[in-house]
Image (cartoon, rainbow, N blue to C red):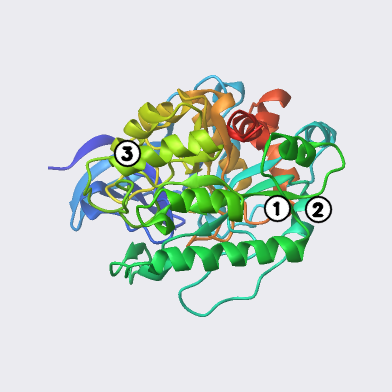
Amino acid sequence: MDETRDTTGWALPIDAHRLLLTEDALCCAGCRPDPARTVLVESEAPLEVPAGRLRFAGTWHPAAPWRGRLAGARLLGLAEAPGPWLRRRSLLGAALPLACVAALPGCATPAPPGPTAEALLARATPADLHSHAGRVILSRMRQRPLEPVAAPMREGRMRLVALAMVADTPVTHVTPDNRIAPFRPPAPEELAAHGEAAFARLHALVAAQGLAVVRDRPGLAAALAPGAGPAVVVAAEGADFLEARLEGLERAFATHGLRHLQLVHYRVNELGDIQTEPPEHQGLTAFGAEVVRACNRLGVVVDVAHASFATVQRAVEVAAKPVVLSHTSLTNRPGPRSRQITADHARLVARTGGVIGIWPPSTIFPTLRAYAEGMARAADVVGARHVGLGSDMLGLLSPACFGDYRETPALAAALLKVGFSTDEAAGVLGGNYARVLAEVLPA
């Protein structure tokens, strides 16, 4: 029977008068809405939607394969009341035309930063918790040439990036539905050998670009000092290269300058379970706990991005120092393969004193303004002190609203416009990650 009903969800535009309303925000272009959890929304008037979880009212009809169809729909506003950061200005005042939301990044060109944003950049030390800039990833297939990193960083005043090799590429691939997933088990020593080659490519890029490498607290202070050039923290996305041997971590620390280790990636490895595959270990393994303790002893940041909730729960219990979750965003109900996290998931990281890096897929944040609002929503949950920038530069399968370090000034302006104070924005831009590095790195 047809009835009037309110429905909430995340908008996926189809055209000016229709959209799909999904229970979970889609985290990348490879995500496909689950018909059983998706409503087709139709409106006689052109639809204009802001970023965020939305509430629509209309007449409900059955509409296979979708959960239903909402006809004659009208937007009631955001489904959730904004917290302290988002209350500082009107969310609906930031509404974007539907055509802009559906387009690729760049459809709404940000205005040049004004004097306040320039003052923020002058005092901030922008830092990225997770980057593959320069095409640093060692591909399983055709290898692309390395690309510039230092010049975009200088032009955008990005000071420091966690530059990450990827540990599991020999045994993962992009699926027909545009996801990354494992497709075979590794051969003995295969991922250890790949790790050596991947670190070598990273250092070749660093040398070619003249980038400083941060290895300890004095090096961090030098990298963040006024007038310093662009610098990197050597990172690994996945600890698969260890092949369950702790001595591999000692070697990567001493030989390759590893100072930021993400425990898992797109393969359930010897350390623990991941968000995008069925669990095998029911969380962090005993070896994973050993690695966390060894990272704390050596001075390596522990990164729990891609890890399942149970894996993160155990990792933060074991950790004696702050941990980070370098690239994600928040949602109320992540899907079974979603890389987004809940508020409780984020709080686990924040309780260690750590930082959650918000990433910029345009499927979630179509503009820099929307991206800044996503950071503000995270601050509503864990506090601005525990929010950072995790661009996943050149690592996303979808376009990104922040895809070039030259856009850092525009992001700084957007953070101020959505309600962050100058001090808070400076922390989100990089100060919060720098604080964690200063607590974790060797003296």
Q: Is residue 398 left or right of residue 112?
A: left
Q: Is residue 52 visible?
A: no
Q: Secondary structure at mark 3?
A: helix
Residue positioned 54% across, 38% down in the render: 298
Instruction: Tell me the mark number nearer the camera, choosing from 3 and 1.
Output: 3
Q: Residues within 10 Å of mark 1 (few under 14, many from 20)?
A: many
Q: What is the CA distance from the residue labelled 3 to the residue labelled 1?
A: 32 Å
What is the quadrant of the C terminus in the image?
Answer: top right
Residue 314 quadrant: top left
Q: Upstream in the sequence, badge 3 or badge 1? A: 3
Q: Position of residue 214 (x, y in %)?
A: 69, 45
Place of residue 67 in the rendered image (x, y in percent of width and height, measured from the top left): 21, 49
Q: Most extreme residue toward the left, as rendered?
A: 1
Residue occupying image coordinates x 60% and y 38%: 372
Q: Is residue 298 above or below residue 66?
A: above
Q: Amino acid at mark 2?
A: Glu
Q: Secondary structure at mark 1?
A: helix
Furthest-top residue in view? 84
**Disc assigned to residue 155:** 2
The kind of residue tagged 3 is: Thr
Can you say whether 206 is above or below 283 in the image? below
Distance from label 1 to label 2 (Cα)? Answer: 8 Å
Is residue 251 visible in the rendered structure shown here?
yes
Q: Which residue is mark 3?
A: 311
Q: Is residue 111 left or right of residue 38?
A: right
Marks 2 and 3 in Cβ contact (< 8 Å):
no
**Callout 2: few (<14), some (14-19), or many (20+) C-alpha neighbours within 10 Å?**
few
Q: Residue at x 65, y 26 (%)?
A: 420
User: Are the residues at dot 1 and dot 2 in contact (C-beta closer than 8 Å)?
Assistant: yes
Disc 1 or 2, which lies upstream in sequence? 2
Gap in Å between the C-alphas at discs 2 and 3?
Answer: 39 Å
The disc label shown at residue 405, or none: 1
